Amino acid sequence: MIRSTSRRVLALFCAALVGLVLLSLVMAVTGSKMTRGTLLAMTMMQNVLVFIIPAMLVVRQSCPKPWHVMGLDVAPDWRALLLVAVAYVVSIPVLNYTVHLNEAMHLPSSLSWLEQMMRASEDAAQAVTRQLLENSTLPAMLLAVFAVGVMAGVGEEFFFRGAMLGMWRQNGAREHLSVWVVAIVFSAIHLQFYGFVPRMLIGVWLGYLFVWPRSLWVPIAAHALNNSMVVIFSWLTDTHRMTLDIDHVGVPTDGQWPWLALASALGWVALAMMARRMFFGKAPEASRME
């Protein structure tokens, strides 16, 4: 049994690397063109091979009560799920404004080479995202919701919150430090530097949704909701069913003060404080999943 926390985390990333190699081999053997269908299939396979299986294997081999460490044995409280839904709506303006600020970031001229690399990586990631979100029909949109929303929510939460954060917490790591470190790793591993800050903030929120209710199903619900709504809003916009540009809600025009983003930030903090009072240290035995 792996006992050292650092060794556990190293084993987790090694297992993920093995899964990534397997995924690359599958792609090489099939030789499929990168169509939207292929990307959706690879996205689902990635979540299984790179995130879900490594997380379950490493935690099972290193912890005496793996499902408890990952928070899989505690059913989500309905109040937590309601709070997740409300917080999603409340956080839209401040996250949009943070995206706006992050995208406007520029490095010093001496680091122009690094900025060019970061921009190229960002453009490549956005190109893949646009291809995944090209949904002209309702069935295509629903398939994207399952692949990009549900599967990504389950896979990434199994890996980052359930396994990585769960093992650190089980070993007595400080609550705030462990939540923020995992959130930074979670954002960095996406290799989208101009979305780093908002994704890190989402990772922090997901981390607290794990350590306070002590149920992984809560951050899974929050993650899946966030990703799924991106797909749904993209479909509504592309098919001209919605005219509101949801990505610019909270982003002020030139010269205006970001009042809506500020109110959104304060509301999000208030909901976080409510969640802590409501759920911190409370995982009733009655909610245990057999």
Image (spheres, rainbow, N blue to C red):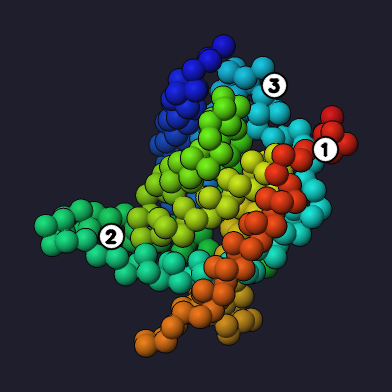
Residue 99: x percent and y percent? 43, 67
Instruction: Answer few, some or many: residues within 10 Å of disc 3's Cα (few below 14, many 20 plus, some between 14 and 19).
Output: few
On the image, numbered disc 1 is attached to which residue? 284
On the image, numbered disc 2 is attached to which residue? 119
Residue 113 visible in the current orientation: yes
Q: Does label 3 or label 2 sit earlier along the sequence?
A: 3
Q: Is residue 156 left or right of residue 79?
A: left
Label 3, secondary structure: give it: loop
Q: Quadrant of the N terminus?
A: top right
Q: Which mark is residue 65?
A: 3
Label 2, secondary structure: give it: helix
Is residue 137 or residue 54 the one in the foreground? 54
Instruction: Answer few, some or many: residues within 10 Å of disc 1's Cα (few below 14, many 20 plus, some between 14 and 19).
Output: few
Label 1, secondary structure: give it: loop
Residue 220: x percent and y percent? 66, 47
Residue 155: x percent and y percent? 59, 41
Residue 139 visible in the current orientation: no
Foreground tag (3 vs 2):
3
Q: Amino acid at mark 2?
A: Arg
Is residue 200 or residue 126 the one in the foreground? 200
Q: Quadrant of the C terminus?
A: top right
